[in-house]
Image (spheres, rainbow, N blue to C red):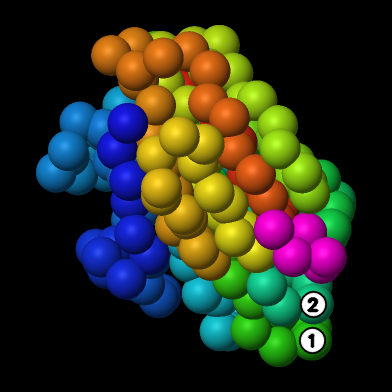
Amino acid sequence: MQILLAHQYAVRPWKNGGGQTRDIIVSPPGADFDKLDWRASMAQIEQPGPFSAFPGLDRSLTLLAGERLNLHEQDHCYTLTPHAPSIDFTGETVFDATIPDGPVLDFNVMSRRNRCQHQLQRRTLHQTQTLCRTGEALLVFVVAGRLDIADSGLSLGLHDALLLTEADPAQLTVTGHHADAALVSITYFLK
């Protein structure tokens, strides 16, 4: 199992140059936007503007902090809030983003559709639970609170993550802490 700590995430510019993103993990390691199989990242959105285009990639997005992110696509608008479900879209989708209530922080997952697929879920973990890796990799990302990993002495804090691959057991027992919940974004990657 690989532990990924928030203070160690690499920062890179957005593909369109409009801001910065923090890479949580990129596969294969060090791959650029044209060569990655899959990637998970966080981005602070501080001003309205277009989303970067990523032809050949499928994307999922959920809001971590801030009040509201509106994604405008032709005649439709998707609204994300910290408690709304994530949205899935293709990298070819042309979105213009607005942040009517100020800056937001998002969690973004993308995968190259001809090599792998992903699924993003938001889960609340208040007690001890077993998480199962159903694909070749499972990324556990802490949205809020703290997550203790059974029989390891390890804890994950805000925006830390853990990666399980086929070299690891298929199940992981964790305990979530804090009354306001340990919200964990679970992403299943198949490569």
Residue at image location 83% in from the left, 65% down from the top: 179
**Residue farthest to the bottom?**
102
Residue 158 percent location from the top left of the image: 53, 66
Residue 101, percent across and down? 79, 86
In whole angstroms, how far apart are the C-alphas of marks 2 and 1? Answer: 6 Å
Q: Residue at x 55, y 11 (%)?
A: 134
Asked whether, in this view, residue 19 is left or right of residue 128, the answer is: left
Q: Given this view, does label 2 or label 1 mark the residue nearer the observer? A: 2
Identity, as a three-letter code, of the amino acid under mark 2: Glu
Circles 2 and 1: CB distance less than 8 Å? yes
Residue 99 in sight from this viewpoint:
yes
Indicate the secondary structure of the residue bearing disc 1: loop
Location of mark 2 (residue): 67
Residue 57 is left or right of residue 12, and the answer is right
Task: Tell me where residue 152 appears, x and y as whole percent.
Answer: 39, 39
Q: Position of residue 180 (x, y in %)?
A: 82, 67
Report whether residue 117 is seen.
Answer: no
Q: Is residue 108 magenta?
A: no
> Which class describes the residues within 10 Å of circle 2: few (<14), some (14-19), or many (20+)?
some
- Check disc 1: other Cα within 10 Å, few if <14, some if 14-19, many if 20+: few
The residue pinned by badge 1 equals 101
Displayed quadrant of residue 121: top right
179 magenta-colored? yes
Q: Is residue 123 above or below residue 100?
A: above
What is the span of residues highlighted in magenta in the rendered image? Answer: 177-181
> In the rendered picture of this protein, how many numbered marks are placed on residues?
2
Residue in front for this viewpoint, 51 or 133: 133
Q: Which amino acid type corresponds to the residue marked 1 in the rendered image? A: Asp
Q: Nearer the viewer, residue 114 or 190?
A: 190
